[in-house]
Image (cartoon, rainbow, N blue to C red):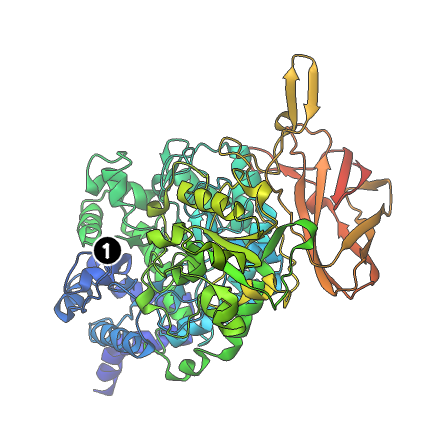
Amino acid sequence: MMRQHLANYILTPLFLINFICSFGQENIDLLIDEMSIEQKVGQMTQINLGFLSSNVDQHDGKVKQIDNEKLKRAIEQYHVGSILNTAGTAYSIEKWHKILTDIQDIALATPLEIPVLYGIDAIHGVTYTKGSTLFPHNIGLAATRNPAIANQIAAATAKESRASGLRWNFDPVLDVGRNPLWPRFCETFGEDPFLVATLGAELIKGYEQDGLSENTAVASCMKHFIGYSDPKSGKDRTEAYISDITLWQKHIPSFKAAIDAGASTIMINSSMINDVPVHGSYKLLTELLRNKLGFKGMIVTDWEDIIRLHERHKIASTPREAVRIAIEAGIDMSMVPNSFSFCEHLIDLVKSGDISEDRIDASVRRILILKRDLGLFTNAYPEKDAVQNFGLQEYKSLALNSARESMVLLKNQDNVLPLPKNKKYLLLGPGANCLSALNGCWSYSWQGDNEEVYPKTSKTILDVFQERFGTSQVLCDVKSEYSNATNFSINFSDEEINNVDYVILFLGENAYAESPGNIDDLTLDHNQIDLAKRAVALDKKVILVLIQGRPRIISDFSENIDGIVNAFLPGSMGAQAIVDVLFGDFNPSGTLPFTYPAHSGDLLTYDHKNLSAMVRTAPNNKTYGGYHPAFKFGDGLSYSDFSISNLKLNADTITTDEKLQISFQLKNRSDLDGTKNIDVFINDHYASLAPDVKNLKDFTKVFLKGGEQREVLMELDRDDLFFYNAKGEKLLEEGSFSVFIGDQTATFYLKK
Ligand code: GLC
């Protein structure tokens, strides 16, 4: 009798679950052997919480109530294994815990008791939990050149996610910002692959370094593999044409670095490259991602992207064919997300023999391993003791410090900045009093423009000015609604204007996310240009603060502006950081992670070819000046006065096994302490594939006290001197190279 009971217990879900938690993959296989095709397909299915709510109109911005019957149907009837997003807006931690508890109660009441894996976007802090701390978006974080701060931000975000009960973060964005028109440019670390790879890997580590079963970690999700960020038209989710050489040299390095850093999951590019939708590409998802790059984690689609192989890309004549193509390409989980069609089609495909059960077992295995590693089989519910890690003051300090370090001082004519604190200031422009502009996309809502859900403690720039200087020194009538007509005019009397010492313009963009952020012209909106010109006409010192996710062109008026600060999208403490920089309470050190174009028809990146560097003004009259942006990659001023000199290399010639030791003198010629970001570039003079004029290979930050001088040592090796060919082979070729640091250059010869 006892033997029979034991036998019965061994095959019960409880035993399987316990067995899985305590042992390895072979026990995952034991569970898989117990699963029906329907249960397996359900694990590969991810559904949007909004679809399981009372009102399924996805983007009406209204808060929806979860429909428990729909929830039960999804989990009990379709065996759905993953759910994502919110039903309309950010939730309190208490509400998240209630929703997640209801979900897991239903899941753990099913025969196999497999917990649901919940996915969320938290790309600059936790988007959908009220009271979370939002950090600078990646485009600003890249200007800090500070990998440590990137790691700290990810670790803080992981803690606030996990405190919310959310264990899978659809982040980091590892796309390389090669086209500034692209509306997701702000989500990238800019145009350089090395910078993106270095900072992206730190985010992966920050999310996962404590171990996925710890209540301070989340599973990361590299995205969006691959080639999403360089659409030919600049419009989101439109075709890109990227050669294999460019793919290897510009787009793969950040994903390779993230895989090496231990990323658990990856999300796929919604678009197509070279006429092939990435979601349907066996070459990209299996041959490249799995076989060449060695990724072993779980692959999830982006939003509705299997359905769109039929509906948009038109490579599948039926929705069923779209599922077959995507699964054969290598997809593990479908973010369907607003129907059960994926389940129905995939079950049919397996039962009809068009897709093998072994193939779906491979995906189910990866999904169950991830759930095990995240501790879901041990405890599927929100971890109460994680809540203590939410809303810590240290996150606010981190948000302030990272926002300060992200600010880039682009122009400071006659040292107009920092501003004196005892003067009168006229604040103009829509960014002066707008929370959503400071935070951008993925800020308490998808678009970031629902200011009702921002923490009540959030401050606009006007709030901070009035706190610090009182209303007597500050003239401003800018409304919080970005597009309010008042914000584009100067509504003060001559007498009021006469009393003003400085005009500060806050221009740029309001919040947008993805395709809603598509534009036809990178030039700043004309109503803002008109306002700037009228501000200049007031004949005062004018400071421009750009609050934007991409470099909007300001050439129409920038020469008449005295000081320019690019603030990007600085997050929860952005207003305080901007005012700190304007008045010298923080000495700016940020440096551009992208090229800032002067003209909408000249979107050349800094790592262009020699052909673009030259400007043929006549058949035989060539000059160099093809790269003539408003501001260059790496530009950024300080209130200190730094000089770089005496660049030396330890050898004129090195072999491929030797390191190149670099030294240079860095001097702070002012009496003001400051930090200097230093980029190290190389140029391969001649190569079998056309070399770029320069490539970033290292960077560092150096703090010097006023008057201090220091020798800075850096080094390069063979891993900095190779380039990829179309097959992804690393070519290290003998020949001469240049090293560029600041305005210093040195050359060396690489000998094989
Ligand atoms: C969106 C984005 C992706 C995000 C996903 C889930 O469309 O492309 O970055 O993670 O859907 O919200």
Q: Position of residue 228 (x, y in %)?
A: 43, 42
Q: Dot 1 surroundings within 10 Å: few (below 14), some, or many (20 or more)?
A: few
Q: SS for tag 1?
A: loop
Specify the quadrant of the image occupied by residue 682. top right
| Residue 219 % position (x, y) | 43, 65
Q: Quadrant of the C terminus?
A: top right
Seen at 65% across and 12% down, the residue is: 619
Q: Is residue 337 above or below residue 723?
A: below
Q: Nearer the viewer, residue 441 or 341?
A: 441
Indicate left or right for 215 with 9 as reference: right
> Depth check: 290 or 500 in front?
500
Residue placed furthest toward the top: 619
Can the viewer see residue 569 in this picture? no
Where does label 1 land, which residue?
Answer: 59
Tag 1: amino acid: His
**In the image, 186: left or right of 689?**
left
Residue 514 in view: yes
Where's residue 406, x and y in %?
57, 59
Q: Could you tell whether 742 is left or right of 488 in the image?
A: right
- For the residue pair 324 and 400, the one nearer the viewer reads as 400
Q: Residue at x 30, y 51 (%)?
A: 303
x, y percent for residue 344: 17, 51
Image quadrant for the N terminus? bottom left
Count of marks placed on residues: 1
